[in-house]
C-alpha cells in the first residue's frame, strides 16, 4: 500500500512537472542590434537562441527587438512587450543605463528580468528584487579581479572608464581591491572616439600600468590610438575591453593585453567545449563573453521552466535560483542577491591559427560574489 | 603640467580640428551653394571608412583603400544627389531634414547588410606607423601629424579651387545668387551634383583617415556630424573660412577642456569626483562656446554674404 502510494505520488509529481514543462512561456529580448554597440547585442541574441534551439523546447517563444542603445526606446519596447505581447520574462539588455530604465519597472509589474550582461550596483544591494536575476556577474566583479591582479606587479595605476553607471561601477570595483597609488582617475564620454587627450595624460602621468574599461567601439579606438602613441605602459582591462567582438577590429595592437573574464574559449570542461563547437557551427565565428552569458541566461530559464510554471512566481524564482545548469564557465551558483558566485580568471590576448583570441592564464578569484549582496534582503 | 604635455594636447586639438574641417567644409559648401541641410553627411563619412577598410582588406594596401574611399563617397554623393536631394532644393528645411534623416537610416542598414554588424579592421599604413620625438622630450604619433598635414593640404587645395578656378567662380556665384547664375546660362544642375560629390568625397576622405585610428562601424558618422554642425554654426553657415576657423576652435577647445577641466575641478573636490564632474563639464564646453559666440555674433564668425 505504502509503495503504491509512493508510486502514485511520484506519478502525480511527474505529471505536474510535465504540465509545467508544456506550458507556453514567452520571453521578450530587448537588445542592441543596430548602431555602434550592435556586435554586443548580436552575440547576446545568438548565444541565447543557441541554448533555446539546443533544448528543442517548442513551448518557448522569444520576441526580439532592437533598442539601438537608447534608453527611451528600450522603455517603449518593454512597455509594448509587457502590455501587448504579454511576455513572462524580459532579458537581453547590454547597457546598464538602459537596464536601469527597464528592469525596475518590469519587476514592479510582476515580470521576471534575467539579465544577460548589465548589472548595475543599484540593483544588487538594498534594491535587489526577487524577480530580478543576473546571469552574467555584478558590474564590479571583473574590475575587482583586475584590481587584485594589479596589486601584484603595479604601484601606480592610471584608470579610465566612460562616464555612465557601469563605468563608475568599474572604477569603484577596481579600487575596492587595488591597494597601490592612483596616477589618475579619468572619466570619458560614452561613445567617445578620440582618446588623444587621455593618452597624452597617460604619457605624462608617470603611471606604471593602465586600466581601461571601454566596451565596444570605444575600446577599438583606444587600443589602435594607444598602439601608435609610442607610450610603453602595459594596458589591462576587464574582459569587455578585449572581448571576441572587438579583437578582430583592434588587430595585433591587442596582443599581450591582460584582462579578466569568467570564461575564455580555451576552458577545459565539457559544457564549454560543447558550447564553443555548437556556436561555431551555428554562426561560424568565435563567441564573446556576452554570448556565454546569454547562453547561460537561456539555460537558467529553461531549467526553471522544466520544473515550474512561470505564472507561479515564487516556485519559478526558486527554480531559477537553484541554477541547475551546466555552465561553460564551470562553477556557477546564485548569491542571495541573485547575482552569480563564480570563478574569475586572468586572460591574455594571443593569436591562435591567425585569429586573435583570449587564453586563460590563471584563476584570480574562486567563488567570487559581490560587495552588495550583504545589503540585499530577499 | 609640463610644456611638452601642453604642446602634445595642442597638437591633438589641431588634429581633431582638421578632421572636423574636412567634414564641415563639405557640409557648409553644400549649404552655402544649394541651401540644403544634409544630415546624411555623416553617412558619407561612414561610406568612406567602410570603402577604405574593405578595399584595404582585399588589396592589402591602405593607399588603394584611400583612393577607393574618395571614389565610393563621391559616387554615393552623386547618386544621392541625382535620386533624392535634387527633389529637395525647393522644399523647406524641415522636409530636407526628414528626407536626409531617412537617408541616414538607409545607409546604416545598407552598410550592415553589406558588411555585418561587427566593426571592420583597418590599420595605419606601415609608412605612417609609430611615433616621432617632439621638442620637450615627448613623442607624437606620425599618423596624427599626417592627418594634420593632409587637412592643411585639403584646406589649401579648396582655397585654390574656390578662388582660382572656373568651378570655384561658379560656386562663389552660386553662393551669392542662385537664381542669377542660372539665368546667366550656367548649368546649375550639374554644378549642384559636382558640389555635392565634392563635399561627399571630403567626408569620405575624413572617414577613411579617421577609420584607421578608430572603429569602422555602422553609425560612426553621427557623432562627428553633430560636431560638424557645431563647427559650421560657429564659423558662419556657408563660409569655408569660417568652417576652418570654427573647426580648429572646436577641436582645440574640446581637447583642452577634456584635459584641463578635471584638473581644475581637482582643486576643489576629491579626484574621483573631479574626474566625473570635469568630464561632464568638458563634454558641454563646445556647446557653451557656441552659445557665447552666437550671443555675440548671431550669424557666426564669418557670415556668408547672401544669408
Image: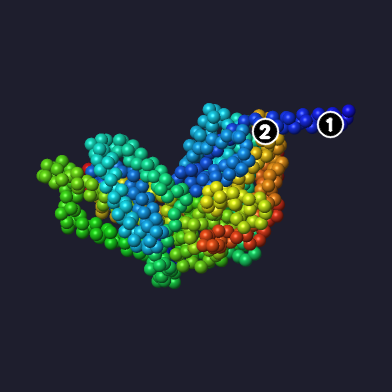
In the picture, the quarter occupied by the C terminus of chain A is top right
B135 versus A161 height, above or below: below
* For the residues bearing labels 1 and 2, Cβ distance under 8 angstroms: no
Inspect this view and state whether residue B175 appears. no
Question: What secondary structure is found at the residue carrying circle 1?
Answer: helix
The residue beneath circle 2 is A21
In the picture, the quarter occupied by the N terminus of chain A is top right
Indicate the position of residue B65 as horizontal and vertical percent values.
Answer: 35, 59
Q: Say which mark, if any, is on residue A6.
A: 1
Indicate the position of residue A171 as horizontal and vertical percent values.
Answer: 58, 53
Crowdedness near tag 2: few (<14), some (14–19) or many (≥20) residues, C-alpha within 10 Å: many
Q: Residue at x 54, y 32 (%)?
A: A81
Whole-angstrom CA distance, mark 1 to mark 2, is 22 Å
Q: Say which mark, if any, is on residue B5.
A: none
Horizontal relation, residue A178 to residue B263: left or right: right
Indicate the position of residue B230 as horizontal and vertical percent values.
Answer: 34, 47
Amino acid at each position: 500500500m505504502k509503495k503504491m502510494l509512493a508510486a502514485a505520488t511520484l506519478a502525480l509529481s511527474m505529471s505536474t512537472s510535465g504540465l509545467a514543462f508544456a506550458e507556453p512561456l514567452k520571453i521578450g529580448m530587448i537588445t542592441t542590434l543596430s548602431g555602434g554597440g550592435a556586435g554586443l547585442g548580436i552575440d547576446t541574441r545568438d548565444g541565447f537562441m543557441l541554448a533555446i534551439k539546443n533544448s528543442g523546447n517548442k513551448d518557448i517563444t522569444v520576441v526580439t527587438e532592437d533598442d539601438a542603445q537608447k534608453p527611451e526606446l528600450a522603455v517603449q519596447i518593454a512597455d509594448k512587450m509587457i502590455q501587448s505581447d504579454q511576455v513572462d520574462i524580459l532579458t537581453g539588455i547590454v547597457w546598464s543605463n538602459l537596464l536601469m530604465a527597464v528592469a525596475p519597472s518590469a519587476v514592479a509589474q510582476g515580470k521576471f528580468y534575467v539579465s544577460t550582461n548589465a548589472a548595475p550596483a543599484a540593483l544588487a544591494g538594498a534594491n535587489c528584487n526577487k524577480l530580478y536575476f543576473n546571469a552574467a556577474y555584478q558590474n564590479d566583479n571583473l574590475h575587482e579581479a583586475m584590481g587584485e591582479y594589479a596589486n601584484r606587479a603595479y604601484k601606480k595605476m592610471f584608470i579610465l572608464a566612460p562616464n555612465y553607471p557601469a563605468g563608475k561601477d568599474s572604477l569603484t570595483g577596481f579600487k575596492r581591491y587595488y591597494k597601490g597609488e592612483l596616477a589618475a582617475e579619468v572619466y570619458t564620454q560614452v561613445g567617445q572616439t578620440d582618446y588623444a587627450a587621455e593618452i597624452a595624460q597617460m604619457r605624462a602621468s608617470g603611471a606604471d600600468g593602465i586600466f581601461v574599461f571601454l566596451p565596444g567601439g570605444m575600446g577599438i579606438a583606444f587600443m589602435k590610438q594607444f598602439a601608435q602613441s609610442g607610450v610603453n605602459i602595459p594596458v589591462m582591462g576587464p574582459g569587455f575591453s578585449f572581448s571576441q567582438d572587438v579583437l578582430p577590429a583592434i588587430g595585433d595592437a591587442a596582443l599581450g593585453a591582460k584582462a579578466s573574464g569568467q570564461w575564455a574559449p580555451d576552458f577545459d570542461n565539457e559544457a564549454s567545449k560543447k558550447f564553443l563547437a555548437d556556436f561555431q557551427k551555428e554562426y561560424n565565428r568565435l563567441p564573446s563573453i556576452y554570448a556565454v552569458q546569454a547562453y547561460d541566461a537561456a539555460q537558467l530559464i529553461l531549467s526553471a521552466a522544466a520544473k515550474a510554471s512561470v505564472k507561479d512566481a515564487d516556485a519559478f524564482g526558486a527554480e531559477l535560483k537553484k541554477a541547475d545548469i551546466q555552465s561553460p564557465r564551470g562553477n556557477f551558483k546564485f548569491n542571495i542577491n541573485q547575482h552569480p558566485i563564480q570563478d574569475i580568471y586572468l586572460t591574455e590576448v594571443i593569436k591562435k591559427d591567425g585569429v586573435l583570441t583570449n587564453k586563460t592564464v590563471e584563476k584570480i578569484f574562486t567563488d567570487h560574489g559581490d560587495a552588495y549582496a550583504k545589503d540585499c534582503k530577499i | 603640467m609640463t610644456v611638452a604635455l601642453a604642446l602634445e594636447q595642442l597638437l591633438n586639438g589641431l588634429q581633431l580640428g582638421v578632421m572636423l574641417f574636412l567634414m564641415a567644409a563639405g557640409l557648409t559648401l553644400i549649404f552655402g551653394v544649394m541651401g540644403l541641410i544634409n544630415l546624411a553627411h555623416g553617412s558619407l563619412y561612414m561610406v568612406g571608412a567602410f570603402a577604405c577598410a574593405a578595399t584595404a582588406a582585399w588589396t592589402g594596401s591602405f593607399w588603394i583603400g584611400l583612393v577607393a574611399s574618395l571614389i565610393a563617397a563621391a559616387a554615393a554623393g552623386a547618386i544621392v544627389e541625382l535620386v533624392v536631394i535634387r527633389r529637395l532644393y525647393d522644399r523647406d528645411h524641415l522636409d530636407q531634414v526628414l528626407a536626409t534623416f531617412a537617408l541616414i537610416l538607409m545607409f546604416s542598414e545598407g552598410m550592415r547588410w553589406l558588411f555585418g554588424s561587427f566593426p571592420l579592421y583597418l590599420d595605419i599604413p606601415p609608412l605612417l606607423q609609430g611615433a616621432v620625438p617632439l621638442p620637450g622630450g615627448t613623442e607624437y604619433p606620425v599618423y596624427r601629424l599626417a592627418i594634420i598635414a593632409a587637412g592643411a593640404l585639403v584646406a589649401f587645395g579648396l582655397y585654390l579651387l574656390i578662388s582660382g578656378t572656373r568651378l570655384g567662380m561658379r560656386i562663389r556665384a552660386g553662393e551669392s545668387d542662385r537664381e542669377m547664375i542660372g539665368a546667366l546660362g550656367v548649368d546649375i544642375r550639374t554644378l549642384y551634383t559636382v558640389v555635392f560629390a565634392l563635399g561627399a568625397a571630403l567626408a569620405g576622405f575624413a572617414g577613411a583617415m579617421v577609420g584607421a585610428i578608430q572603429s569602422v562601424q555602422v553609425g560612426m558618422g553621427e557623432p562627428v556630424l553633430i560636431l560638424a554642425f557645431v563647427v559650421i554654426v560657429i564659423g558662419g553657415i556657408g563660409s569655408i573660412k569660417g568652417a576652418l576657423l570654427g573647426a580648429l576652435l572646436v577641436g582645440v577647445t574640446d581637447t583642452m577642456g577634456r584635459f584641463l577641466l578635471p584638473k581644475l575641478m581637482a582643486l576643489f573636490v576629491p579626484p574621483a569626483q573631479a574626474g566625473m564632474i570635469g568630464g561632464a563639464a568638458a563634454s558641454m564646453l563646445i556647446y557653451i562656446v557656441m552659445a557665447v559666440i552666437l550671443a555675440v555674433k548671431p550669424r557666426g564668425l564669418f557670415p556668408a554674404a547672401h544669408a
